[in-house]
Image (cartoon, grey):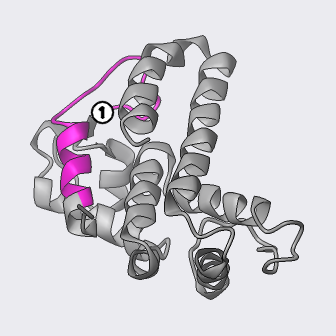
Amino acid sequence: MTKTLNQTIDNVIEREGPYVNHPADRGGPTRFGITQAKAREDGYAGDMREFPRDRAFSIYWRQFVTAQGIDLLAKRSPELAAEALDTGVNMGAPWGVMFLQRVLNACNEGGKLWPDLAKIDGNYGGKSDAALAAYLAHPRRGRIDVLLAGLNALQGERYIGIAERNASQEAFLYGWLLNRVALAA
């Protein structure tokens, strides 16, 4: 069953959970996955333990769905949109779309099947949509599960790299791989 973007955000909020302030988490205090810094940018001045769920949902919608073009992506592939959104929430808004853009470029046989995306910028717009449409229409391509596997492979590699570069982040690696890569596969 394909999830809507609203359901994906609800799942992210549920998975991210209530207030957390792990000493090794570079994001600092968070509630529903929204960092204190992100909440302050949005004008919230209160205690993060009291940060409202509906405000978290609104931030996810504005800063992760519409700002990155994931709403446009959802029209072409709700599954890819859900994965890109979830990845962006955990790694930073552009990462999920950047991974998709990279995989689309790598699957185009050196630009023979569709033009390379010149900018891997994390914004899903007309050029990214045209590349995905060409991929989906291609007789030897077209499998969304293969794109999802590519996104998850890049995500897993990035998590491992983060842990290798900073041992304090190893505390989170197992959970990242379990909850963001293995369960998504």
The type of residue carrying mark 1 is Pro
Q: Looking at the image, can residue 73 be seen?
A: yes
Which range is magenta?
8-28
Q: Is residue 25 magenta?
A: yes
Residue visible at 75% across and 62% down in the picture = 107
Tell whether position 184 is magenta: no
Vertical arrangement, residue 137 with respect to residue 106, above or below: below
Residue at coordinates 31% horizontally, 62% vertically from top-left? Answer: 60
Horizontal side of 29 relative to 185 (left or right) equals: left
- Which quadrant would the C terminus be assigned to in this image? top left
Residue 155 in the image: above or below residue 69: above
Residue 107 drawn above or below residue 177: below
Q: Is residue 183 above or below residue 134?
A: above
Callout 1: SS: loop
**Residue drawn 57% across and 34% down?**
156
Rendered location of residue 95, percent (x, y):
57, 54
Q: Position of residue 12 (x, y in %)?
A: 26, 48
From the viewer's side, name the closer residue of 36 and 14. 14
- How far across and how far down the image is residue 109, in percent? 85, 66
* Image position of 47 (left or right of 176): left
